[in-house]
Structures are given as C-alpha cells and as structure tokens.
Amino acid sequence: MDLEPRSATPASSALARERALELLSRGKRFVLSGHQRPDGDCLGAQAALASLLLDQGREVWIYNPDLPEKRYAYLGEKVQQRAFTGGDLPLHDVSVLLDFSELTRTGDLAPVLAKHPSKKLVVDHHIHHGAPWWDECYVDVTASATGLLVRRIARELGWKLDRSAAQGVFTSLVTDTGWFKYSNTDAETLSVAAEMIALGVEPSSIFDKLYQQRTRHHPAYLARLLARTEYLADGRLAVVDQPLAEKLDPDLVDSDELLDILRSVASVEVVLYLREIPSGACKLSARSKTDYDVNALARRFGGGGHRKASGATIPGTLGDVRPQLVTAALEGFGASAPTPR
Amino acid sequence: MDLEPRSATPASSALARERALELLSRGKRFVLSGHQRPDGDCLGAQAALASLLLDQGREVWIYNPDLPEKRYAYLGEKVQQRAFTGGDLPLHDVSVLLDFSELTRTGDLAPVLAKHPSKKLVVDHHIHHGAPWWDECYVDVTASATGLLVRRIARELGWKLDRSAAQGVFTSLVTDTGWFKYSNTDAETLSVAAEMIALGVEPSSIFDKLYQQRTRHHPAYLARLLARTEYLADGRLAVVDQPLAEKLDPDLVDSDELLDILRSVASVEVVLYLREIPSGACKLSARSKTDYDVNALARRFGGGGHRKASGATIPGTLGDVRPQLVTAALEGFGASAPTPR
C-alpha cells in the first residue's frame, strides 16, 4: 500500500530555508494559522513562534479555524488563541501556516488567506501532496514535530526562547511523539526537550494540564470502550468502534490513550478507532506499530497524517463505514475481508 | 504525615563519591546485586554498570534474589542476569548494590553477601533509613534514577558507554520517571536520554519490549479493573482493589498503566491499587500526584519507596487490609474514615 505521489515535498532546500528565515526576520505583522481542530503540535508551534516574534517587537495574531480544546489554554497566555469567525483578518504582511500545508484545512479561513496579499509561509513536517502554492516554506518531514522546526528557526535567527516559547516547543514535542514513545523520538527531540526544561518547563505540570484533567467518569467510560475491542487478521488488527447510541461523551476519552492500550498487545500492528459522530459521519483514528502505512489507508477515506498516525472523517453511518474500512485495512496486510457477521 | 527519620542519607559527599569511584576503578571482580523483584531501574543500572566494567576488563556477575520479568531479557544480552539459588557466590572483591540500600531486600543473598569479605558499595537514589552499614556509597536522592548515577560514574571515570550500557541507562530513566512524565524528570534526565539515543538506543523499540508485549486479553482485563474504581475523600483518593477470587492474571496488568489512568482524573491526588495475592497477603501500589507522601503511607504498612510512588506487601486478606489502609490514607488528607459499608 503506497499512495505517495511523486510530487511529495520531503524537505526544504537550504536555500529555501534561508528565504523562509528572511521572510520571518523582515516581516512586521504576522498572522499564524493552524488546521481545523488544532492539536498540541500545531498550537505549541504557534505559541512558540508567536512568543518569539512578539519578543522581537512584531505584531502577532493567532487565528485558527476552531478554538483549541480547553486543556491547551496555557498556550494562549502570551498571545491569545483566536477562532476565525468571519470578516477580515488584521492587516499583516506575513501569514504563517504551522503543522500543515493544505490551505483547505484552514476551513473558512482559506478564502480569506488566499485573497489576502500577505506572503505565505509554511512551517511543517508533513509530506505535501501536489504542487507548492506558498511563497516560502520551512519543511522537514524527518522532524518529530513542527515545534522542533520553530526551535531550529529560533536558533538560526539567534532569537532566544522564554519560558512561554519553551512551553510551546515542549508541548509540540510531546504531542507528536506520544510523549517520547514513538519511533520519531530522536536525539534532537530529547535534547531540545532537555533544553526546554532548563528554560523553566515542568514536564509533570504539562502532563497534568494535557492528560490529567479528566472527569471521574473517565475510567468507567474507558472500560466500556476497551470491552469493545475486536481482533482481526490473527490479532494483527485491533478495531474499536463506538456507535452514536453508546452516548460516550467524546471529550471524556482521549483517543491516544485508548489507542496506546490497544497497541500494547503484542500481536497488534494496526489499531483503528472508529467513532460515529452526530453529523452522519465517522471519525477514524488509525495507528501503526510497524511499517504498515496508516497514512495511505486514511487517504483512501479522504484523511491523512503520518505513516504511523493518521485520521479521517468519513461520511456515512458506522454500519456503512466500518466494513469498507476493515476491508481496506485488511488489504494492507494482504489478508482477505472477514466473513460478514 | 512525615515519618522521615533524622538519620536519613540524602546524598554522598564529594569525598565519599571519590572513594566510591576509587573502589570501582581498583576492583577486579564484581558482583552486582539488586533487590527482590528487581525493576527496570535496578536491572538497567546493573546492565549499564556491568557493561562498563566488562569493557574495562573486569570480571562481573549479576545476582538478584529473583529472576527478572521476561520483558527485561534484553538487558541480559551482555552480562547474564542470574537469580541466586543458594550456595556460594563467585570469588569477588567488590559487591555493588544498585537501586536500594537495605541488605535485607536481597532476600537469601543477604547473609551470603554479609559474610563475604568483599567491599560493599551502594549506588542508589533512595533515602536510607538507619545507620550506614556499607563501605562506600554513591547516593543522590535528587537523581531521577539509579541509572543516571551510573551515567555520572562513567563520566567521572572517563569510561565510554556502548549501546548495551546505553540501553541499561535509558531503561532506568524511563522506568523511574514514568517514561519522562513524573516530576523527577529534569533537564539532566532528558539530556542523558538524548545522549543514549545518540549511542544507538531506539526509544520505540525499548517501549515495545517493556510495554507492548501484552496478550490479547489485556484490554478486557484492564477494563474489568477500571470498572472497580472507587472514589473517597471527595474524589481525592481513588482505590482499586482486586480480590483473589477475581482471578485476574497479575502479569496481564502492568500496575503503572492502571495507576496512570486513575491519576488522569482531575480530582484524584492519591491512587491505591490493592491486589490480594495467594500467600494470604495484599500487594499495595500507591501513587501521589501532589505533595501527599505515599512513602510515609507505605512505610506504616512495612513498605516504602518514594514520596510519589511506593509499595508494600501487607499480610492479611483484602477484607482485613483494605479498611486499615483506607483509614490510614484518609488520615493523610486530614479526612475521617468512611462510614463502614
């Protein structure tokens, strides 16, 4: 299963990175934008870059298509995290897209950004599919997190990180490495994390904010989901589905936690968590422990991400979506579809 | 709740550390010993020190009172991890105790070590209660893991770590910091972890070996335990008990995972997991998210550990032990005992 197009951009050239740095150092008024339902890497990288720019005397606004989850509020202490609700953006000369490269993922912001005469800069560690559309880019798909790229940018520009910027970078790193567990955790990642601690970040405090704010009902809800685990392909594939009728408050369960538990089973190579949502669609979270490419799988259903962690929002009821998804997932193992139940 | 005796040893003096290093550099034949049911910090620190000593041309044996859990087998690749089964130890001039300081915790090894004329060295990061009994010690209770002390020792002696030693140090660090989540995760810890990656350690591979070898039954067992969660003291205390009759295979559940999930509830400050075992006793695992000292609690029941992570094996049935434990735990909040059910 390999759906990578030939035009994919793996990393900016040294020259392209130079031009990106020049844009950052010459710009005066910046709008930083993220993708829909911005995650900790996107928000952390934004907080870090916004803090750095502010310290350099620039004007900075953060506009995302959606408001962040409450647990990320600490990242908005220095520069407010705004949700775009229509109208015009503040006057600015540079728009920076962090942690993604497809303008459509900014939702209602997309047409506004597209028509705005600002220069467009992409800072990202995902593979871009299609032709480049931006003015400049600072991309490295081998970087564990976009926040790591912001750290590199600061070093190359000689900009110092304060504690607020350090919290942003640290949040990026832990979000995209599964708190330093995934195979993208390299020496640079841990070395930068150590540096962020020296700048005042307290890992246990960040962990508490991100992952220890659950309600008392959480263990029981998690137990109900775990009890729904099904194995296919001799236990290489684990599937948990969550019908709308289960009425599990989606905010109560952090899907990463559930996915990590399923991945802890020795035989399991791929985990699919498929949650029916009220809009008549299903949200897929897919994870791989091996070379199995869940990005390719998610792209078949209109989603994407990384080879080992991807997602998609798939139109249709659970009854419609699940069999298609399972069949496609089994093909990835070279296994045939299961007998209908 | 403060049961720390005045004689506790917080850290070796610089002079004491010098003497400890001298013992390591002059010794020829070493026996490294750990505590009963050796954990990842103990075994990782042993593997690292054994590897270093072997590279320096010394003879090294590792003897623990118990065989390690199977998941730690990769730590025995260079120097075999042996269980002491009686008889004599090999001739040696230095015995090193790693990750503990009370000789009784070596079980059947204790009298053999005590009568052996070898010099005794303690390398540890726990508080020692009582008078020092060893010849030399290299202790720092602020160190996140004993493996970190082995790293410091190597640096001070100018000994290079190979990949095998690096795996030992890395395993120590991740074991005792809850994979870099707990408040003992400092800049030195992450910086040394980064260094170990540069020496060839693959975090995701270590994670897989330690935490992703579970059976397919694991999610369902974990679900059953989570469903037993009870809250006391307005949700500040979470208790999970596991009666012998539940017949949950204890090896199927890593108590850290269960404890971490309970700790993720915002109101919870202390988690107690009490598991009835066949010998007519209960095993307690206690964790704290706050200043609440679970070491003091565990010591009241004959156990111990750290302020935030402690354990005990308490004689008696679950019916006997649980009410006593809960009463003692509630006293720590200044709360009164619950009404009997």
Image: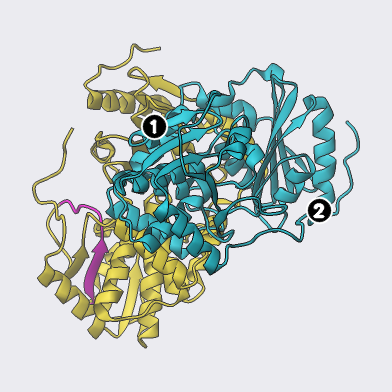
Chain colours: A yellow, B cyan
Q: Secondary structure at mark 1?
A: loop
In the rendered image, the vertical position of residue B1 relative to residue B300, given as above or below: below
Say if residue A340 shows up in the picture: yes
Mark 1 surroundings within 10 Å by alpha-carbon count, few (fewer than 14), some (14 through 19), many (20 or more)? some
Residue A307 versus residue B301: which sits nearer the camera?
Answer: B301
Q: Which residues are magenta?
A: A118-129
Mark 2 surroundings within 10 Å by alpha-carbon count, few (fewer than 14), some (14 through 19), many (20 or more)? some
* Quarter of the image where the N terminus of chain A is located: top left
Look at 42% across and 63% down and name the residue there.
A170
Look at 26% across and 65% down and name the residue there.
A123
Q: Position of residue B97 (x, y in %)?
A: 54, 45
Q: How many numbered marks does the figure carry?
A: 2
The answer to whether residue A27 is left or right of residue B333 is left
Q: Secondary structure at mark 2?
A: helix
Q: Position of residue A195 (x, y in %)?
A: 40, 68
Q: Position of residue A227 (x, y in %)?
A: 54, 25
Q: Which residue is mark 1?
A: B80
